[in-house]
Structures are given as structure tokens and as C-alpha cells.
Image (cartoon, rainbow, N blue to C red):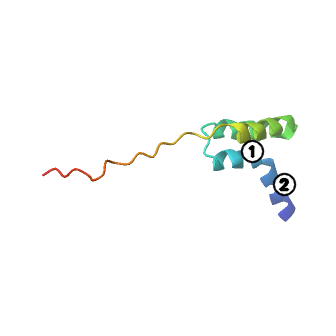
Amino acid sequence: MFHLLILIGLYFLPTLIASGRYLPERTAIALLNLFLGWTCIGWIIALVWAITAPRPYVYYGQPPYPPRWRP
């Protein structure tokens, strides 16, 4: 049973990588992995896509300091 869980984890490795990197294409990678991962070429394409896709750019803006007080 433990071996089956490891194999399922390896099968969905591209999906786990895409989700962990918060890629906007993670749904497409998951669908490709689910439906074409069994062909091995689909799994390799999903893995390469998950690894090479650029991470989304996140801007962490800060409010002006010190904050303005409005009476």
C-alpha cells in the first residue's frame, strides 16, 4: 500500500511542483498530467513545463510611512 502512494506521488509530481510554485498554469499542467501523463511523454512535458515556467511576479507595496491621519 505504501508503494502505491509513492507511485501516485511520483505520477503527480509535475502537478505538485506547479502548485508549490503558485503558477497560473497549474490547472493546465494538472490536466495534462492527469490525462496524458500515462504516455510518459506527456508526463515529461508536464514536468518540464512546471519547472521552467517563470514564477508570477508579485509586488509587495507598502503604504507611505508615516500614515496620514485624517480627522
Disc 2 packing (10 Å; few <14; some 14–19; many ≥20): few
Q: Return the disc, 2 or 1, that comes first in the chain's sequence.
A: 2
Identify the secondary structure beneath mark 1: helix
Question: Do we see residue 1 in this rendering?
Answer: no
- Residue located 41% across and 45% down the image: 61
- As drawn, the residue found furthest toward the left would be 71
- Position of 20 compared to 12: left or right? left
Image disc number at residue 14 = 1
- Residue located 26% across and 52% down the image: 67
Query: Quarter of the image containing the N terminus?
Result: bottom right
Please say if the residues under marks 2 and 1 sit with CB atoms less than 8 Å apart.
no
- In the rendering, at what x and y percent does residue 5 appear? 80, 59
- Residue located 64% across and 39% down the image: 27
The residues tagged by marks 2 and 1 sit, at their Cα atoms, a distance apart of 13 Å
Identify the secondary structure beneath mark 2: helix
Q: Nearer the viewer, residue 52 or 40?
A: 52
- In the rendering, at what x and y percent does residue 70 appear? 16, 50
Q: What residue is shown with label 2?
A: 7
- Position of 39 compared to 20: left or right? right
What amino acid type is highlighted by mark number 2?
Answer: Leu
- In the rendering, at what x and y percent does residue 20 appear? 65, 50
Q: Is residue 71 above or below residue 31?
A: below
Disc 1 packing (10 Å; few <14; some 14–19; many ≥20): many
Q: Nearer the viewer, residue 50 or 57?
A: 57
What amino acid type is highlighted by mark number 1?
Answer: Pro
- Position of 10 compared to 25: left or right? right
Q: Is residue 16 above or below residue 49?
A: below
Question: Do we see residue 49 in this rendering?
Answer: yes
- Residue located 65% across and 40% down the image: 26
- As drawn, the residue found furthest toward the bottom would be 2
Q: Is residue 24 above or below residue 68?
A: above
| Disc nearest the viewer among 2 and 1 | 1
